[in-house]
Image: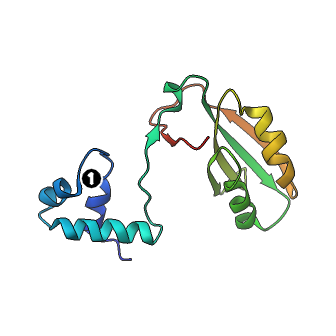
């Protein structure tokens, strides 16, 4: 799908989760069917997902961690995809720099750091050289899908 200025404008308007497709269409000067068709196509092609996001600091007992992972295997994409399927993982990205993969993970009182590493990471740790964990004490604009 080609992402043109109208489609980008639709995506920007969708950040306001309360705005209807009709309101977006009226503001952009296009038909509601145009907006609906583009949104459906963006979703069908996995370019965009519409989801409620939460501030983890606003939910008692929840926190976010980032995990930097150095791998021994050259199969970075395969490992990152494997990590992305673990419980609590919001995102898993192949990156440049000190680490090969960076993960964003949502934790709570019942599923904390120990449970994440022993129950989720341990079974898929083949090829992992080292990890470093960063606990978020205070986040700004840190909104995540509630996946636990």
Which element type, helix, strand or loop, lies under badge 1? helix
- Residue at position x 75%, y 61% in the image: 79
132, 118: nearer the viewer = 118
Q: What colour scheme was applied to this rendering of the protein?
A: rainbow
79, 58: nearer the viewer = 58
In the image, is residue 55 above or below residue 144?
above
Q: Which residue is mark 1?
A: 13
> Label 1 crowding class (10 Å Cα cut-off): few <14, some 14-19, many 20+?
some
The quadrant where residue 63 appears:
top right
Query: Quick check: 125 left or right of 92?
Result: right
Q: Quadrant of the C terminus?
A: top right
- Residue at position x 72%, y 55% in the image: 83
Identity of the residue furthest to the top in this view: 60
> What x and y, as percent, mark residue 43?
42, 66
> What x and y, as percent, mark residue 128?
84, 53
113, 9: nearer the viewer = 113
The quadrant where residue 101 appears:
bottom right
In the image, is residue 37 above or below residue 134?
below
> What x and y, as percent, mark residue 71?
81, 56
- Residue at position x 27%, y 44% in the image: 18
Q: Quadrant of the N terminus?
A: bottom left
Query: Quick check: 76 left or right of 6?
Result: right
Q: How many marks?
A: 1
- Residue at position x 45%, y 72% in the image: 45
In the image, is residue 86 above or below residue 45?
above
Query: Quick check: 58 left or right of 20?
Result: right
């Amino acid at each position: 799908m080609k992402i043109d200025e109208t489609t980008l404008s639709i995506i920007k308007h969708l950040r306001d989760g309360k705005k209807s497709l009709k309101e977006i269409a009226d503001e952009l000067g296009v038909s509601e069917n145009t907006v609906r068709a583009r949104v459906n196509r963006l979703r069908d092609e996995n370019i965009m997902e519409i989801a409620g996001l939460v501030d983890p600091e606003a939910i008692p007992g929840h926190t976010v961690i980032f995990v930097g992972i150095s791998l021994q295997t050259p199969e970075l994409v395969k490992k990152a995809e494997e990590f992305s399927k673990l419980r609590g993982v919001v995102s898993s990205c192949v990156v440049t720099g000190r680490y090969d993969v960076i993960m964003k993970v949502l934790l709570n009182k019942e599923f904390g750091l120990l449970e994440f590493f022993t129950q989720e990471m341990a079974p898929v740790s083949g090829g992992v050289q080292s990890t470093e964990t960063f606990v978020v004490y205070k986040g700004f604009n840190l909104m995540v899908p509630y996946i636990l």
